[in-house]
Image (cartoon, grey):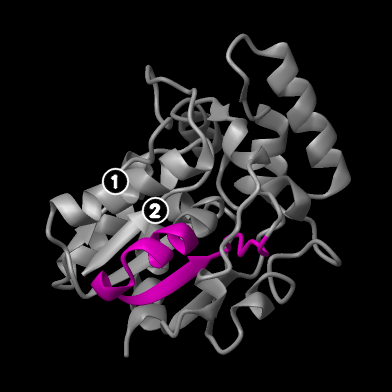
Amino acid sequence: MFVLVHGSWHDGSHWAGVVERLESLGHVAHAPTIAGHGHGVDKDVGHEDCVNSIVDFIVAGELADVVLVGHSFGGSVIAGVAEKVPDRLRRLVFCNAFVPLPGQCLLDDCPPHYRTLFRRLAEESTDNTIQLPFPLWREAFIQDADLETAQRTYRTLSPEPFRPLQDILELAEFHRLDLPKSYLNCTEDIALPPGEWAWHPRLSARLGQYRLAQMPGSHETLLADPSGLADKIVEAGRD
């Protein structure tokens, strides 16, 4: 069973193509929406609210033996979930995802130009949220899709609550957990710029012992190549 946790500006519906492929392969797959994410919802949430919303989904559904997949910001969420319900989880899969260090916030893992941009956008908003600029989406997030796909998918994004990116995360228990972990790296993902700020191996190395799975694709492979990503998630999540 897979539970897929989305990233910033997304909601659970963005996993639709991946869920469809996983189900066609005979797997059970769920894609809940994190608290404060999606259109027309209260954006006044903290990181703990985000984590608890996924914990509540797993517990309310009596889910067990879960391969918990986190994309981007979702990596920090599944780390928090793992601290709270480790007995319900089979493996964690970080898909070009953040792996926060104890005592830091997610902004600490973003390059300086992102921090400046995000703070400015949050200050300019009326509700402390960040709307991702289309040029950044097009050039750095979904550069492997055609323009029509980039424009269509951009319209489905929603403003991201800023507070979860600023909250200090403890996560000391997460880094002590003896849960199997995988890191799925899409090799053309430049949402974090290559070099010192790259996803892999900078963030993946924080997992200690982990399985590495790689495939071509941008940060938004879940939208540009959902079937291919689903197949790679199965590989990353198997025993």
Q: Is residue 85 magenta?
A: yes
Q: Which residues are magenta?
A: 78-102
Residue 144 x, y percent position in the rendering? 60, 53
Give the side of residue 140 with respect to residue 41, left or right: right
Distance between the Cα atoms at labels 2 and 1?
7 Å
Nearer to us in this view, 127 or 211: 127
| Three-letter residue code for mark 2 | Val
Secondary structure of residue under mark 2: strand
Residue 184 x, y percent position in the rendering? 52, 73
Can you tell which quarter of the image residue 215 is in? bottom right
Give the side of residue 44 with respect to residue 141, left or right: left
The residue identified by callout 2 is: 5
Residue 92 x, y percent position in the rendering? 41, 73
Nearer to us in this view, 5 or 85: 85
| Residue 141: image tag | none
Relative to 182, residue 16 above or below: above
Among the two numbered marks 2 and 1 on one chain, the one whose residue lies closer to the N terminus: 2
* Residue 239 visible to an observer of this rendering: yes
* Residue 215 visible to an observer of this rendering: no
Give the side of residue 200 with respect to residue 223, left or right: right
Neighbour class for label 1 at 10 Å: few (<14), some, many (≥20)? some
Relative to 188, residue 163 above or below: above
Residue at the (64%, 30%) spot, across then down = 132
The residue identified by callout 1 is: 32
| Three-letter residue code for mark 1 | Pro
Residue at the (60%, 32%) spot, across then down = 163
Residue at the (71%, 55%) spot, across then down = 104
Q: Does the residue at mark 2 contact the one at mark 1 (Cβ under 8 Å)?
A: yes
Secondary structure of residue under mark 1: loop
Q: Quadrant of the C terminus?
A: bottom left
Residue at the (44%, 54%) spot, across then down = 222
Q: Residue furthest top?
A: 126
